Every structure is written in structure tokens, then in C-alpha cells.
Image (spheres, helix red, strand yellow):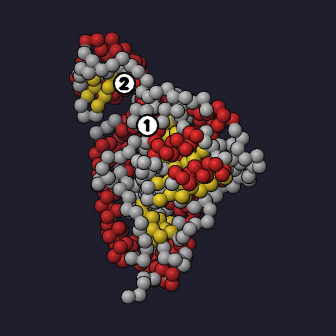
Amino acid sequence: MHERSSVGELTKRLRSELDRYSPGGKLPSSRALVERFRVSPVTVSRALAQLAAEGLVVTRPGAGAFRAARPPAPAAPAGDTSWQEVALSADGAADLVPRSADASGVLASLAAPSPGVVEFNGGYLHPSLQPERAMAAALSRAGRRPGAWGRPPMEGLPELREWFARGIGGAVTAAEVLVTAGGQAALTTALRALAPPGARVLVESPTYPGMLAICRAAGLRPVPVPVDADGVKPVLLADAFRASGARVFVCQPLFQNPTGAVLAPGRRPDVLRIAREAGAFVIEDDFVRRLVHEDAGPLPRPLAADDPDGVVVHVCSLTKATSPSFRVAALAARGPALERLRAIQIVDTFFVPRPLQEAALELVGSPAWPRHLRAVSAQLRTHRDTMTVALLRDLPELALPHIPRGGYHLWLRLPDGADDTALTAAALRAGVAITPGRPYFSAEPPAAYIRLSFAAVAGTGEIAEGVRRLRAACDELPGCRPPQA
């Protein structure tokens, strides 16, 4: 039987039997449903996901599925998205700026170093940390499904959209999610949809170079808003909105790239309020939520989870936690903005290939997925601690203002007078690839910085060797030598 028809038939049967259970009552286990209806575990999972999307059941990982305690209700207040009509129609700056495409900041973390070079500049997990077997098995199973090579829904598979919606905290529905070909594509779509060419866009300073490259290629003007250990500064954000007339602010509230900062609880409502008062969107790039370290504790909810009015356009991805080639991500938005995002994505890419979406569903629904996340969480903490100890011991002149509990990199300030570009070149000669800090600033940097990744290396021994080589590179440059006793 065709997989889709099996899911539809099982959903209909389960829906008709829900009255047998009292509100809050537990449904039979997935295994029992598989045996009773003689369907695959995937079919059961998708049928339950459809009922959950309808508000008829509640699924709890590790506990099972339960009849919803109350009649179906909207996941969150409807809010007021009418303000978006003004924001989306505003032309911003009248004088357009030339578009320029400069991928150098992105290539710094994409280009593979020469053999023998320690990769402290990588932006993805080392192959030993990737769930290669689980991905291969998921792709194999997905490719054999009936209809797997057909055209998917333009917005993405409903079950995958539902999975992403649950990850945002239940604040958005599956209907408000679009599946995209990776986080970079999602950011490109969001910026093109929300900011006309020539407009000013507020960005964190420092920030992700790939996002700055998107802005400039689209003819946008990035305006920096400084970040400290608690994330973006609300007072400066409000000042930047007033001075620039911007209608978009791009931020990474969780383990920001490159600083690793987490937006403080007291600042979260201020950021949303300031953007709402400015009639502006907040593009939330939630890029490493699944790369939390073992000692992080509970994570704050996405900003989108506290926003009923469609201020936040949320971006999240599976790529960082899997493989650079596993390019599956999501955009979530409310109101008229969602339709504009959808239209631009269709024009740009049509849709994400169905086999990849099916493989993503297979992967995140498998027992291997939580095991992988736990293993990566432990390994990243070990790598972070190893690199931190080695840097404090061997390179005390490099200031490390913040040690993050998530993500995959450290942000270090060089001594006054040091040159990050010169150090990057010297480090490569010494056999270690690092990332200079200058591309992370949309204007003049306040000091010289470097970013060191601890995720793209094979293990702790390679980290220790990389720091030793970086010490040798620093010794070449007068501005980076350790202080004399």
C-alpha cells in the first residue's frame, strides 16, 4: 500500500477511536499500533504527528501519546500582524546601494585546509562527530519509500514541518513553517523578503560573516549594534532603530557567533518590544540549539516562542548537528510575511528535494538521533575544556572573555597592536588554520580578534597540538608575544 494512503487511513481510524479514551488518557504504544494495524513504525509516527497537529493528541517523548485534555485550541494567541503591511511596503532608504558579492568571510570556515594542517577554522562537526551511519541508514530507508522521488509539497513535508514546529516550543503551527535547503538559504530568503534593496538592516557586532555577505549581495546596508556577554544591548538597539529607520534586526540569541553569548533573560522582552515599537522584524538565527554542551543546563526558549504578533521570523537548521551536506532547515513566520517568504523560496529553489526531507524525518525519528545529540554534547564540552585549558596555559596574552556552554568556537581578543590577519597567515605557516576576526564586523573593529573552532578537529590531542602551533605563530609577531615577567 502507498505510504501516504496508509498514513491517511491510520489517522482516520485513530481519530474515530479517540472517544474511547478519557481526556489525558494514554493511547496504545507505537509497537501495539504497529502490530494491530500491520503498518510500519514510520506510518504510526506520522499518523500520531498528524493528530498532534490537529490538537487531538499530545505526544511526550519517552512516555507515549495521550488524548488531548481539552478541545483543540490555537497553539498561541492569534496576535495582531496587521502592522506587517506597513513594514513590508516601506521602501527604506531611497538611495539604492550597489550589490557586491564577497564570499571570503564564508570561505574562511568552508575551505578545507591542506593535509596536516590543524583545522581551528571549521564551521562543522568533524566526521568522527557526525552521525554518518545513522544518516546513511536514514537516506537508504527514505530512498526506498513509495513516492520518495516525487515532487514534495512546496512548503515541505507536513510531518517535517510539524517536527520543526514542536522544536520552536509549540509557539507556531506546522502551517507556519517552511522547509528550506539549509540555514544560509533560509537567511537569504528572509532578508530578501523583509528588506528592499538599499534598506538598512541592523546586525549584531560582531556577527556571522555569511549573513553580512547576504546583506551586501542583496544591496542592503548592515548597521552594527554591539553585543556583550549578555547579548545585544537593548539601549543601543533602540538607538540604532531610531537613527537608521531599519525594519529588520538579525540576531543569534543563543550561543552567538562568534562571541558565544546568550541573550540575557532580562533583555529578551526588551528586544521584542523595541522591534515591535519600531514596526520591525527580528530574524532569529537559532543555529546551534542542538549543539549544547553537557554542562549547559536548561536552555532559554526561542524568541519566537514569546512572540504572538509575528515580529520574529525564526530560522533553525539540522546541518550544524549532522553534516555540511545534510542541508535541511526551517523558516517560521506569522502573518503576511509568511506568504512573501514562501513566494520567494519557490522562485529561488522550488522546494527542498523530497528524498532529503524524507531522510531527515527518518533520522530525527530514529533511536540513533537522541544518542547522537548526547554524544556530541559530551564531546563538545571535552573539546571546549581542552582548548580553554591549553590557551590559558600556553597563550595567556590572548584574552578569553567568555567561555560558552554551547556552539563550537571560542572568541579571543589579541593584545593591543596585534594584527589578526598577520597572525592568521603566521598560524597557517605553522600548520594551524584559524579565522581572523575582521570579517565578523560590519564596520571598523574595536580591536583585533580571532575565532578558534573546537568542533572540526579529531580529538583532544589535535587540539593540544594546534594550540602549540599557534603559540609558535604568535612568537613570530612582536605584537603577540607573551608579556615579560
* Residue at the image point whose x is 35% and y is 56% from the top: 405
Residue positioned 48% across, 50% down in the render? 252
Residue situated in front as seen by the camera: 439 or 240 = 240
Q: Which residue is mark 1?
A: 305
Q: In the image as oriented, which residue stretches furthest toward the bottom? A: 485
Estimate the x, y position of residue 334 in percent, counting from the top left: 53, 31
Residue 32 vertical position relative to residue 225 in the rendered view, above or below: above
Residue 333 in view here? yes
Quarter of the image that includes the C terminus: bottom left
Q: CA gap, disc 2 to disc 1?
A: 18 Å
Q: Is residue 326 left or right of residue 425?
A: left
Q: State the image quarter where residue 70 is shown.
A: top left
Q: Which labelled disc corresponds to residue 250?
A: none
Residue 476 picture location, percent across and down? 49, 83
Question: Tag 1's secondary structure?
Answer: helix
Residue drawn at (50%, 36%) of the image: 332
Per the image, label 2 sits on a secondary structure element best described as: helix
At label 2, the amino acid type is Ala
Residue 363 versus residue 56 in the image, above or below? below
Q: Which residue is mark 2?
A: 52
